Amino acid sequence: MDFKSSQCVSNDLVGIDSPIQELEKLLLLDSVDDVRVVGVCGMDGIGKTTLGMVLYDRISHQFDVCCFIDDVSKSFRLHDGSINVQKQILHQTLGEEHRQLCSIYNTSNLIRRRLCRQRVLLILDNVDKVEQLGKIGVCREWLGGGSKIIIISRDEHILKVYGVDEVYKVPLLNWTNSRQLLCRKAFKLDHILSSYEGLVNGILHYAKGLPLAIEVLGSLLCGRDIFEWKSALARLRDSPNKDVMDVLRLSFDGLEESEKEIFLHIACFFNPKNKEYVENVLICCGLHAEIGMRVLIDKSLISINVVQNIVMHNLLGELGRKIVQENSRKWSRLWLETQVDNVILDNMVK
């Protein structure tokens, strides 16, 4: 992808200025000596990639050469990952094709020789394994003074293992920005149509500041009348939006089996609940709660608030309950009175 010529940043961006300013501070853009490496993390659908693209667009003019690698994880899944990414780096920074290169060693040496005197901006998006960074083989020592590397990942642990200088956790949108984004998607305006006020608030309470959910639902409801909005809200209470769930499920699918069990327990029973209490319950269930919960925190699937309660975004909670319901014949977890009644009745029939 020739990122410099792409126009892939939406015109409906809301609440982006503050995160961009925070990232610019962490990057120490005025520094012309040190090579700075900053990590960006957060839950799926929160806008990490969008933030990286906007930042690239705003600061790339300050560098000799620039490169944005879109979806590193996909390159490793579908192609010869390290070679493919290295060739993209050479093409974007130097404008050269290197189809004949097939050795990681030779490609790494070429990158090192050609970029060592350049001030480079390199953004690696959607890194989901620390080994990917090692195989790409771009070290800060290989780049010229003042270079900046930004690594985007849903997993904070990957960033820390790699040794980034700072980690920026992308926040959810506040209420004001959430309203503005929904209005732009649903009404093509910056304000709510008066008769829709209560319905808009219902959507925002459901989305809880997650940009992906707000954009998907806003686009779904664009041009719809009040009765259709009410019907859509009622449907969301019974069945979460598939497009949103499919994105959120990516993080769940990457968990180990024991971590999946912990995630599902929290989604069904412990959101929110005291961290120490939940750990004790999970340990009694034969699960390694301390490391399992740490992994969920690193992957932005749960957080711990100031009063030491476990907090899971309500859409992740919906995802967990949906996953359990997909396997409802096993009755692995019951959290509603009607479910208990159904199990009892089913057993009585048998």
Image: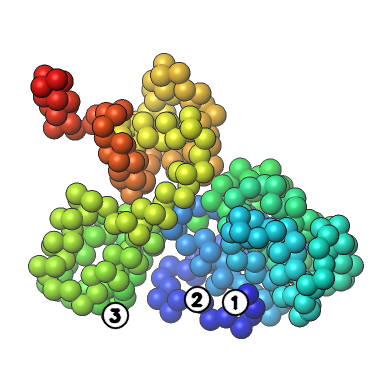
Is 40 rendered above or below residue 18?
above
Q: Closer to the camera, 191 or 286?
A: 286
Q: Total number of numbered labels? A: 3
Q: What residue is shown at x 59% (from left), y 77% (from top)? A: 57
Q: Residues within 10 Å of mark 1 (few under 14, many from 20)?
A: some
Q: CA distance from mark 3 to mark 1?
A: 25 Å
| Location of residue 67 in the rendering, given as x and y in whole percent from the top left corner | 69, 71
Element class at badge 3? loop
Q: Give the amino acid type for the residue marked by disc 1 in the picture.
A: Asp
Give the residue furthest to the bottom: 5
Q: What residue is shown at x 48% (from left), y 25% (from top)? A: 289
Q: What residue is shown at x 17% (from left), y 31% (from top)? A: 339
In the picture, the disc for residue 57 is: 1
Residue hosting label 2:
9
Is 256 rendered above or below residue 92?
above
Q: What residue is shown at x 42% (from left), y 49% (from top)? A: 249
Q: Give the amino acid type for the residue marked by disc 3 in the picture.
A: Lys
Residue hosting label 3:
188
From the image, state whether disc 2 or disc 1 is nearer to you: 2
* Residue 125 sits in quarter: bottom right
Q: CA distance from mark 2 to mark 3?
A: 17 Å
